[in-house]
Image: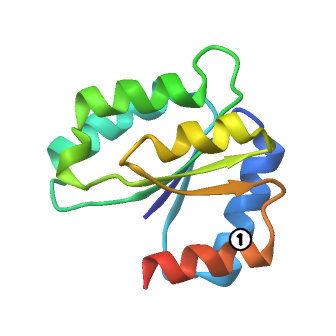
């Protein structure tokens, strides 16, 4: 399973369609609200403890940004568990954001928007 957390419905839909085309065996779930995503992830970890989805997280979201989402997720699922790993998917090319992403054990890749077929190939390599 791949979970997209992005407040932009067009961007997240493009990503989901690209994933469906390039990695059809993976279910893709979209959350346009990070707080709802956290609630559902908490329920998922309880109801399906074997599940280990990959998260695509946008940084710039209005009510809870990507960094705040990651911090809240770390309280639910410690980074040391090596579960619910994530990739940043952002329009930001700011070196400070890239460096900050590297400071999180949970974040394994920093990808820039727009989501492309090349991005899907990166996901495939990670999921292999």
Residue 121 in the image: x percent, y percent? 66, 81
Above or below: residue 83 compared with residue 103? below
User: Which residue is found at the position 48% from the left and 28% from the top?
Assistant: 69
Residue 80 in the image: x percent, y percent? 19, 47
Query: The N terminus is located in which quarter?
Result: bottom left
Q: How is the image coloured?
A: rainbow
Query: The C terminus is located in which quarter?
Result: bottom left
Residue 39 visible here: no
Residue 51 in the image: x percent, y percent? 25, 60
How many numbered marks does the figure carry?
1
Q: Which element type, helix, strand or loop, lies under badge 1?
A: helix
Residue 123 in the image: x percent, y percent? 57, 73
Above or below: residue 8 compared with residue 44? above
Q: Is residue 116 left or right of residue 88?
A: right
Within 10 Å of disc 1 (Cα), the crowding (few <14, some 14-19, many 20+) is some
Q: Is residue 50 left or right of residue 91?
A: left
Residue closest to the eye, 99 or 125: 99
Residue closest to the eye, 36 or 95: 95
Above or below: residue 22 compared with residue 6? below
Pointer 1: what residue? 119
Above or below: residue 119 compared with residue 9? below
Q: Is residue 82 left or right of residue 71?
A: left
User: Which residue is found at the position 46% from the left and 34% from the top?
Assistant: 37
Residue 115 placement: quadrant = bottom right
Residue closest to the eye, 17 or 123: 123
Residue 79 placement: quadrant = top left
Residue 37 visible here: yes
Residue 94 placement: quadrant = top right
């Amino acid at each position: 399973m791949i979970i997209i957390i992005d407040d932009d419905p067009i961007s997240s839909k493009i990503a989901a369609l690209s994933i469906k085309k390039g990695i059809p065996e993976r279910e893709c779930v979209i959350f346009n609200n990070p707080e709802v995503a956290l609630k559902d992830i908490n329920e998922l970890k309880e109801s399906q403890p074997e599940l280990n989805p990959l998260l695509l997280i946008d940084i710039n979201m209005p009510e809870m940004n990507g960094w705040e989402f990651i911090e809240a997720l770390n309280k639910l699922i410690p980074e040391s568990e090596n579960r619910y790993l994530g990739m940043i998917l952002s329009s930001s090319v700011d070196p400070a954001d890239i460096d900050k992403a590297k400071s999180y054990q949970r974040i394994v890749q920093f990808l820039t928007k727009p989501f492309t077929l090349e991005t899907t190939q990166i996901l495939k390599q990670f999921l292999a």
